[in-house]
């Protein structure tokens, strides 16, 4: 796991955008794993403007989203399908049939379980995810893999923890039905990605970030599993990094890396 600390959320988004553009332009048939939540919105905005500036195309790209709520229609304003269409897919030249979000609009557990299994196979058929984008929940979850999720888990139905339901309440109107279940890629699914970029910004994520990077490898902090992925980059703003004991060290490493890149350190 590589840790990079940058001054602001904008810098985090720009750094992640560079990685996405690199993967999309270097691969003939790129496969991206995408995330929802407030954190990746700045990344999607950046990708949309660079795409509109003619820098790259999404035409041959396939995307797989991490998760989807169970119990609301795909067309619901708070579904993750709607989120992705609104923030990225409808604004670029991607073929919508190449964009996958778990199908979760049934209430039949057998149908949902089958959808989850098919999702896993669809990812395999494409040859796997080249770059998986992740955010992190305040309790250390990735996708909707809540604390205690098995590190070997694949795409399946999960019950959301109280803290996740609480954190996502802000997106639903007072008294509106809010899902407590979701289909999510498993931790094993996420770990199968060829590379991973996790973004975290703001003070609210500082404890989860500390547990992920400096805590023990534990299913109580699902994101800690990224310590074991050889090509996982964690990009943080100063606030999200504020509780890290090795904060100065990570900043120093990035400075040295940049100097090396510019040929100033030979
Ligand atoms: N399932 C999503 C996660 O993929 C996301 O990382 C998390 C944090 O979202 P935010 O970036 O809004 O804090 O929210 C949801 O729970």
Image (spheres, rainbow, N blue to C red):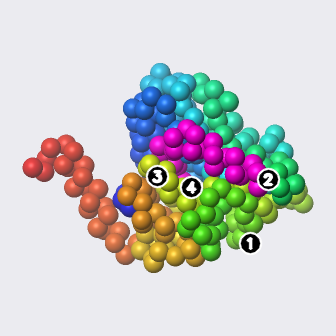
Query: Mark 3 or mark 2, which has the lower sequence index?
Result: 2
Kindly identify the residue that appears in the image at 49 percent across and 34 percent down: 30
Query: Mark 1 or mark 2, which has the lower sequence index?
Result: 2
Residue furthest left as drawn: 266
**Dot 3, crowdedness within 10 Å: few (<14), some or many (≥20)?**
many
**Looking at the image, residue 10 lies above or below residue 52:** below
**In which quarter of the view is residue 175 placed?**
bottom right
- Measure the alpha-carbon separation of dots 4 and 1: 24 Å
Q: Is mark 4 on a helix, strand or loop?
A: helix
Which residue carries the number 2 mark? 112
**Looking at the image, residue 146 lies above or below residue 42:** below
> Which of the numbered marks, if any, corresponds to residue 196?
3
Marks 3 & 1, CB-CB < 8 Å contact: no
Which residue carries the number 4 mark? 189
Part of the protein shown in magenta: 113-135
Which residue carries the number 1 mark? 162
Kindly identify the residue that appears in the image at 37 percent across and 58 percent down: 230
Foreground label between 3 and 1: 3
**Dot 4, crowdedness within 10 Å: few (<14), some or many (≥20)?**
many
- Measure the alpha-carbon separation of dots 3 and 4: 12 Å
Foreground label between 3 and 4: 4
> Which of the numbered marks, if any, corresponds to residue 38?
none
Q: What element carries label 3?
A: strand
- Measure the alpha-carbon separation of dots 3 and 2: 27 Å
**Dot 2, crowdedness within 10 Å: few (<14), some or many (≥20)?**
many
- Measure the alpha-carbon separation of dots 2 and 4: 17 Å
Q: Can residue 141 be seen in this view?
A: yes
Locate residue 33, reporting x and y percent: 56, 45
Query: Mark 2 or mark 4, which has the lower sequence index?
Result: 2
Locate residue 46, reporting x and y percent: 51, 37
Tell me the quarter of the image containing the N terminus. bottom left
Q: Does the residue labelled 3 lie within 8 Å of ligand 1?
A: no
């Amino acid at each position: 796991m590589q840790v990079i600390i940058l001054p602001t959320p904008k810098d985090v988004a720009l750094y992640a955008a560079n990685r996405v553009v690199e993967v999309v332009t270097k691969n003939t048939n790129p496969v991206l794993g995408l995330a929802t939540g407030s954190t990746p919105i700045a990344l999607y905005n950046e990708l949309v403007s660079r795409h509109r500036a003619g820098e790259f195309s999404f035409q041959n790209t396939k995307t797989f989203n991490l998760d989807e709520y169970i119990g609301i229609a795909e067309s619901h304003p708070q579904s993750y399908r709607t989120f992705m269409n609104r923030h990225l897919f409808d604004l670029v030249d991607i073929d919508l049939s190449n964009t996958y979000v778990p199908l979760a609009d049934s209430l039949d557990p057998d149908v949902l379980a089958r959808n989850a299994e098919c999702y896993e196979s669809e990812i395999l058929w494409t040859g796997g995810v080249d770059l998986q984008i992740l955010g992190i929940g305040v309790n250390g979850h990735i996708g909707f893999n809540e604390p205690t999720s098995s590190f070997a888990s694949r795409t399946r139905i999960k019950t959301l923890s109280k803290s996740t339901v609480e954190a996502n309440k802000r997106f639903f109107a007072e008294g509106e039905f809010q899902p407590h279940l979701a289909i999510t890629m498993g931790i094993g699914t996420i770990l199968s990605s060829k590379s991973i970029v996790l973004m975290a910004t703001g003070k609210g994520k500082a404890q989860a970030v500390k547990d992920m990077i400096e805590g023990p490898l534990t299913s109580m902090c699902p994101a800690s599993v990224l310590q074991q992925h050889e090509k996982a980059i964690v990009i943080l703003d100063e606030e999200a990094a504020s509780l890290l004991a090795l904060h100065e060290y990570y900043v120093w490493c990035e400075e040295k890396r940049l100097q090396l890149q510019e040929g100033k350190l030979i």
